[in-house]
Amino acid sequence: MRLVKCWFCSSTIYPGHGIQFVRNDAKIFRFCRSKCHKNFKMKRNPRKVKWTKAFRAAHGKDMTKDKTFEFEKKRNRPERYDRNVTENTLKAIKKIDKIRSAREAKHIENRLKPNKQKKFNEDTKELNNQISLVRAPGVSEKVKVVVPKEKSIQNEAMEE
């Protein structure tokens, strides 16, 4: 089964799906859905359309450079079937997926880290500017309530 990538959004196209456009110079463009085909016909740049993988890669939203991506590359070299090699390959694929998901999570965390500090600073500034909404007007000092330590007869009776 041959799986190809959409020219516009880089998503996977399964057999029997999508649209194929052949230009006059015999260049073939494959699209996963009409949305991609229409955007191509409108001469939109995939790197400037926010929902495409090209945009996410160009703007640092997705992890683009990692050693785990090398395992996805297509190899056109025929291999003789060997059960042990196949078993080891399947085990390796599972390990690689775990490693990739951990690295992606770390990438996202690092990408969002500066924004957390910025949001905290903005919230602190807004709180300082609008402190009257939080604190009642006219109350500027803390009121200390003194509780007597004397035990009443009634409390002693309840404790027994």
Image: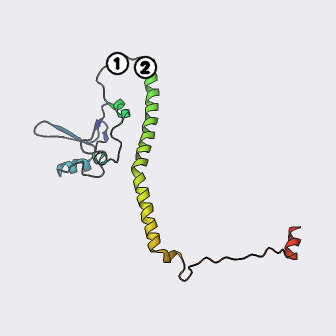
Q: Is residue 47 left or right of residue 147?
A: left
SS state under label 2: helix
Q: Looking at the picture, how far across and down is residue 74, in whole percent?
A: 30, 28
From the viewer's side, name the closer residue of 49 and 156. Answer: 156
> Where is residue 12 drawn, in percent x and y?
32, 39
Where is residue 85, by image quadrant? top left
Foreground pick, 11 / 96: 96
The correct choice, above or below, for 148 with respect to 105 in the image is below
* In the image: residue 65, left or right of residue 98: left
Residue type, label 2: Val
Residue 153, by quadrant, is bottom right
Instruction: Quickly name the residue at label 2.
Output: 85
Q: Which label was assigned to residue 79?
A: 1
Give the residue type at disc 1: Glu
Tags 2 and 1 in contact by the CB under 8 Å rule? yes
SS at circle 1 = loop
Q: Position of residue 114 (x, y in %)?
A: 40, 54
